[in-house]
Image: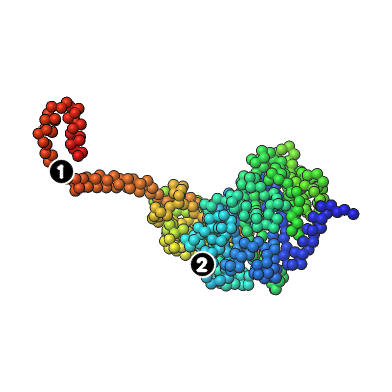
Amino acid sequence: MPVSASALFILGALVLSSVQALSGETYRERLSLSQLPDGTVLGVFDFNRSFSPAVLSEAQANHYSLLPRAIGEIIQTFEVAELHLTFTQGRYNYRKWPMEPYAAPSGVELWAWFRTADTDARWKGLTNALSGLFCASLNFLDETLTTSPLHSYDPEGHHANASRADRPRSARPGNLELRHGILSNEITCTENLTPWAKLLPCQTKSGIASLLNAYKIYDTEYHSMSVHVQPQCQDAECRDWTLEVYQRLVVAVDPRRTVKQKDWSMYLLFGREIQNQCPLATDSTVSVQKNTHSEWFASSGLALPSSESNSLEVSLSSRQPGQIVNLGIKTPGGNLPYFSGLLPSASRIQAHRYLVGFGASQPGMATRLTNSDEKQSYRVVFFQTIPWYLKLYLHTLKVKTIVGSEQEGKQHQSTIYYQPSIDRVRPGILEIEVTLPPKTELLITVAFEYALVRYTEHPPDSERGFQLSSGTVSYVPARCEGACRWSRIYTEPLLLALPTPDFSMPYNVITFTCTVMALFFGSMFNALIRDFSAVKLTEKELAELKNGSDGQSRNWLKRLLWR
C-alpha cells in the first residue's frame, strides 16, 4: 500500500520528537495574539528550548542538537550563569498594554550573571562575541557604560542562595557577579533579526517562525526581540534542573494604520500564513484573545468557538495535513468602543522622566513615580546609570510626595545607594528604594552639571546630543509573602544637549596656518636664495636695444633676463 509524503513527514516528526524527549531536550513554540481595548494587536512569539545536564555535557564535547552552537560556546567560554539580551524599538505603553515581561528599554539591553572572579574580562569577551553574532554594536558597552547595580536586578533563573530576601543588601546572590549595560541609541533592523531567527531549530522555514516577515515587523508601533539563557529547577530541592534557552519576539501592531481597517488576520498583520508545523517542535500552539465586541475569523477547515468565547487555541500538530492556519478578528460595524484609561492588566506603577532647569546653566532631572492601585502599597527600587559626563549634585537630591497620603509635599523616606562616576573610567550608579502607598505620586529630582567633553569624544551626530539611557523601576507588593517576583518597567530615554564645539574650527585653523606659512616661507626663501647681480651690456647689445622697436626690445630683454 503506497504511503503519502505528508504521512511520512508526520511520522518522521513524531519519531524525532520522541527521540528528543528521551535525549533530554525539548522545543516548544507558541504564538499569542491579543486584541487590546484601544484597537492594538499585541503579538508574542515564544520559542522555548530546555536541556538536561546530560545534553550540556555532550555540548562540551562539541555535540550539539537543538542547542545553538553559537550560544553554547559563548556560555562555556565566558562562564555565563545567566544571560538576558533584548533589542527594542519604540516604547511600551504601560497604561494601555498588559504589564511586563513584554516591556524592555529602547535600544539594546544586556545583563548577565557570571560565575567567575575575572568578571570584567569575561564581560568584555561576551559583548564582543554577541556583537559579532547579532551584527550589533554591543562592543561599545565598555567600562564607561557598564554597571553592577545592587538592588534592581535579581537572577531570573534558579540559583543557590539567589533570593533577594535571603541575602544581605550588599551581597551578591550565590557568589555570582552581575554586569549590566544599555545602548539607547542602537537602532534594530533586519541585520539583527536575521541572525536571531537563525538560532531557531527550523529558522523561518516552517512553524510559527514562518510568520517572521521583516517588512511587517519593522512597521509596527513597538517591537522587541530577546534571547534568555537561565537554569530552571524541576523539583523543590532542585536536584533535577534544566537549562532554558528561550527567544521571544513582541510586536504591537495598530491595524488601523498598517492595513487601514479594524478587521485583522495573521496574513494581514504579517503578510504570511502558517503552512506547516516545525517537525522539531514537541508543541506548537497559536492562541488568539479577543474582546466582547468582535467576532472570530479563521481559514477554511478550522473549528471556531462560539462568539461568546474570548479565547481560541489551535495546535498545529492536530490540524489536517496541508491545512493553512490563518486566524483573525472581525469587528461588526467596523467600530471599536473608544478606550481611555488604565487597562486592568496594565502595570500598577507608572514612571515618567523629564529634564528640568534652565538650559545648560542649571540643568536637572526629574522622575515621577505613580501608584495607581487604590489598595496596595508597593516596594519600589529606581535605578539609573549616570554617565561620567554628568556630575550630580547629591545634596540637591529630593524624594517627596506630590499627590496622595498625609505626607503630601514633604520629604519621603527612602534608602539611597550612590556610586560616584570616574571621568572616562566608569559611570555612576543611583538606586533609590521607597515604599509607595496607594494612589500616590512621588517626585525624584536632582540637579547636575555637564563635564567638559573633548571634541574627539563627541559622536558623529554631535548636534543631536548625547543619549541618557532609560531608568529602571523594579517593584513588588509591600506585603509580599514568600518568594515574590519583581516586576520591571522602564522610563523614557533622555536627550542631553552638551556644549558642542565648532567642528569647522580645526579646518579653519589649518587653512589659515598653511596660508601664513606659505607666504612667510616663500618670502624668506626668495630673500635667502635669490642672487642679485648687475647686468653688463656690450656695445652691440646697447645698439640693438637703442635701435630696435618696442616689441623687439621687450623680447630682447626677456632673453637677457633668462640667460
Residue lying farthest left?
A: 539
Q: Position of residue 366 (x, y in %)?
A: 49, 54
Q: Which of the image's four quarters has the C terminus?
A: top left
Q: Position of residue 234 (x, y in %)?
A: 71, 69
Q: Amino acid at mark 1?
A: Phe
In the image, 173 versus 278, the foreground residue is 278
- What SS does tag 1 mark? loop
Q: Is residue 483 left or right of residue 491?
A: right
Q: Position of residue 163 (x, y in %)?
A: 62, 69
Q: How many marks?
A: 2
Tag of residue 120:
2
In the image, 387 versus 550, the foreground residue is 550
Relative to 270, does residue 53 appear above or below in the rendering? below
First in residue order: circle 2 vs circle 1: 2
In the image, 185 versus 522, the foreground residue is 522
| Residue neighbourhood size for the residue with mark 2, other residues' Cα within 10 Å, grouped as few (<14), some (14–19), many (≥20) | some
| Any part of residue 520 in sight | no
Relative to 259, does residue 26 appear above or below in the rendering? below
Q: Residue at x 55, y 50 (%)?
A: 187
- What SS does tag 2 mark? helix
Tag of residue 532:
1
